[in-house]
Amino acid sequence: MKAARRIPLMKKMLAQFGIEEERVRLDWVSASEGDRFAQLVNEMTEEIRRLGPFSGNGGKADD
Amino acid sequence: MTKPKIALYWAAACGGCDVAVLDTNEKILDIANLADIVFWPVALDFKYHHVEEMADTSIDLCLFNGAVRNSEQEEIARLLRAKSKVMVAFGACACFGGIPALGNFTTRDEIFERVYIESPSSANENRTFPQTLTKVEEGELDLPEMFDTVMTLAQVVDVEYFIPGCPPPVDIILKVVDLFASGQLPPVGAIIASDKTLCDECERTKEEKKIARIYRPHQIIPDPNRCLLEQGIICCGPATRGGCGVRCVKANMPCRGCFGPPPGVIDQGAKLVSAIASIYQSDGQEDINRMLEDIVDPAGTFYRFGMADSMLKRKSLPQGERRA
């Protein structure tokens, strides 16, 4: 249940970093819900593909 | 034998690190006896050209405080790196970006707009901004270029040692001087502080870490003997390196994280999100929403000193403004 609190807080923080909300998603899937799992992963993949690569554009060291 | 040479410099900093050196009181005379101070803009009248004229690696120890946020600071960082045998990132700004790196939540243009246009004391109808080059009758005037992104010293030049703190405490400064004088400096890359977290060094009574609401420091008078986190005050102790002498917490103020992440932690802010969210008690979405409301500025709180050194380093620049 800690994840249920951590992820919303992290998402609030990532918004301050200007990171698209869709890049992080928390969902719950039971071990018996294979179809739903596949569907969520596909949705997430499509979403990220739509957003394109993330460029943090941080300090010069990592450029 | 000639005395070793020491240089001190301030880049994007408040001056507190230089004051911390002076806080060594009479020990400053020991330092002056031990070594020649060849460059220290805040205290001594040496110019950049004096440093340029020195032979490479002729300075034995350079204590560099402040982050790097403009071209002058970058140039001097490179100059001092070339002239120094040992480069020390001195203080939270040089180590992690510090308070100046909170500017990484904005851009140069936004800062200029705020400072030169929006600020209530500005009357600037012609929208005059600082220029790196200005032609006047007498010739050209130049100013350093301000960067969009504040950097740590180690993101600009190689650094041998890190002395964290805002400012570094006097006992650590004296320890470094002793280690330097006796030739016992630790392996390159060492962070000269404790290897424990602040919580490990804090003597407050710690019981069960469970909080039901969060107080900002001005909303509560905390019990001076009980863990501040357990009283609902955001204290960065769990994800901050110790060695500071627990100065703030002893003054009944929460840790702000100026010693950076402890060993094993890559991203101080992410660790704090994890720590704070996991001790918050919730029975459902309503409680989670209250936590989100209570933590007004998570990024600014959890990366107060560590923005430039964090994994993300800055707020994403708008598309089209990204530098290669």
Image (spheres, coloured by chain):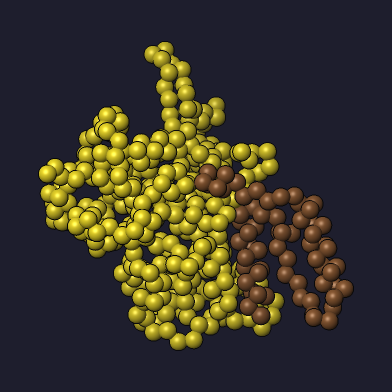
Drawn side of residue B41 relative to residue B316, left or right: left
Q: At x 66% / y 43%, what residue is drawn?
A: B318
Q: Position of residue A15 (x, y in %)?
A: 65, 57
Residue at 79% across, 57% down:
A47
Task: Residue at 39% x, 38% y: name it.
Answer: B78
Disc tally is: 0
Query: Residue B128's spot in the image, x, y percent?
Result: 52, 28
Left or right of B73, for residue B41: left
Looking at this view, name the residue that lies furthest to the top. Answer: B137
* Left or right placement of residue B275 versus residue B82 in this view: right
Color used for chain B? yellow
Quadrant of the image containing the C terminus of chain A:
top right
- The answer to which of B254 and B239 lies nearer the viewer is B239
Q: Is residue B170 visible?
A: no
The N terminus of chain A - image quarter? bottom right
Q: Residue B129: percent from the left, percent from the top?
A: 51, 30
Image position of B9 (left or right of B300): left
Question: Which residue is situated farthest in the bottom direction here?
Answer: B207
B23 above or below B213? Answer: above
Instruction: Give chain A's shade.
Output: brown
Residue nearer the viewer, B40 or B220:
B40
User: Of residues B37 and B258, which is closer to you in this image?
Assistant: B37
In this picture, is B256 found above or below B308? below
Residue in view at x 43 percent, y 77 percent: B228
Rendered view: B90 above or below B135: below
Residue B155 horizontal/vertical position (percent): 47, 47
Q: Residue B126 is drawn in which quadrant?
A: top right
Is residue B1 visible to us here?
yes
